[in-house]
Amino acid sequence: MTGQIAIDAKNLGKSYKIGKSKQQVLKNVDFNACHGQVTMIMGPSGSGKSTLIAALSGLMKPDEGEVIALGENLWKKKRGKIDRFRLDHCGFIFQGFNLFPALNATQQVEQVLKYCKVPHGEAKKRAKAVLESVGLGPRLSLRPSEMSGGEKQRVAIARALSKEPSLIFADEPTSALDSVSGQVVIRLLHDAAKARNAAVIVVTHDPRLEAYADRIIHMEDGKILSDHMVDRSSQA
């Protein structure tokens, strides 16, 4: 399954209405990502990176084109079926962490497993195990206000991984972090691709993260300018 295409998009187009005019933010974009790989989408602000992953993940319907995700035509589904697909198969990590202020680390992860209909005892066990796997074993009972930015993002990663998703979408996951915490986060996402065979799609403008990518795509002005696999055979 490693190396097989997990998500395949063709001819994606998306425009936003600004006043009386339209601004096209995706322009006939073709994109795919494979199981077991980290695909990094890079480019300046406004290049269309976040709109692309919103279209790929079922968060925002493109004006044109199609997305085949895990063999299913995503945007041919009804809204409720798209929401269910996202819940069952997708993990999300965002710049702003999106944690519940009143819940501790374990409860943050348990909450998403509750939505997935995982029984309480099993959810508690899985939450503890996945938090320990991202290095938060001693921090299970802490709330977000008691954590560093890097720890909050690791909780968000644990929450995403707890569902054992086939697709992981990370939108600027390190932009609010210092360089050390950022490297920990991208390493965890890299491990998720390799150990869990997920297709990991990371949007970033941080060139330091390129060392963890299997494939790097550069976008600008709504188009893909370059797309290349990273050759690590010559790296020590």
Image (cartoon, helix red, strand yellow):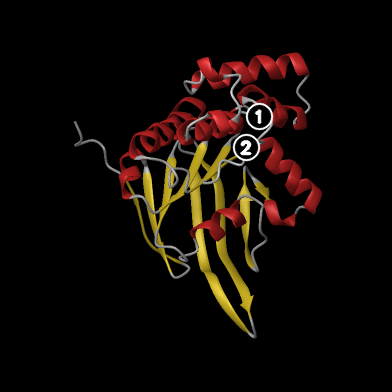
Residue at 70 percent of width and 36 percent of height: 88
Name the residue located 47 percent from the left edge and 48 percent from the top edge: 172
Q: Amino acid at mark 2?
A: Leu
Q: Position of residue 85 (x, y in %)?
A: 71, 42
Which quadrant of the view contains residue 181? top left
Is residue 219 depicted above or below 204 in this figure?
below
Q: Is residue 171 above or below residue 2?
A: below
SS of the residue under disc 1? helix
Q: Nearer the viewer, residue 112 or 42?
A: 112
Q: CB atoms at circles 2 and 1 under 8 Å apart?
A: yes
The disc at residue 117 is none
Whether residue 54 is situated above or below residue 93 in the rendered picture: below
Q: Helix, strand, or loop for circle 2?
A: loop
Spatial CA span between label 2 and label 1: 7 Å
Residue 73 rendering spot, x and y as whole percentages: 68, 52
Tally the marks: 2
Q: Residues within 10 Å of mark 2 (few under 14, many from 20)?
A: some
* Residue at the limit of the structure toward the front, as seen here: 145
Residue 158 falls left or right of residue 87: left
What amino acid does circle 1 point to? Gln
Q: Which mark is residue 108?
A: 1
Question: Which image quarter: residue 184?
Answer: top left
Which percent across, then down, holds residue 204?
42, 51
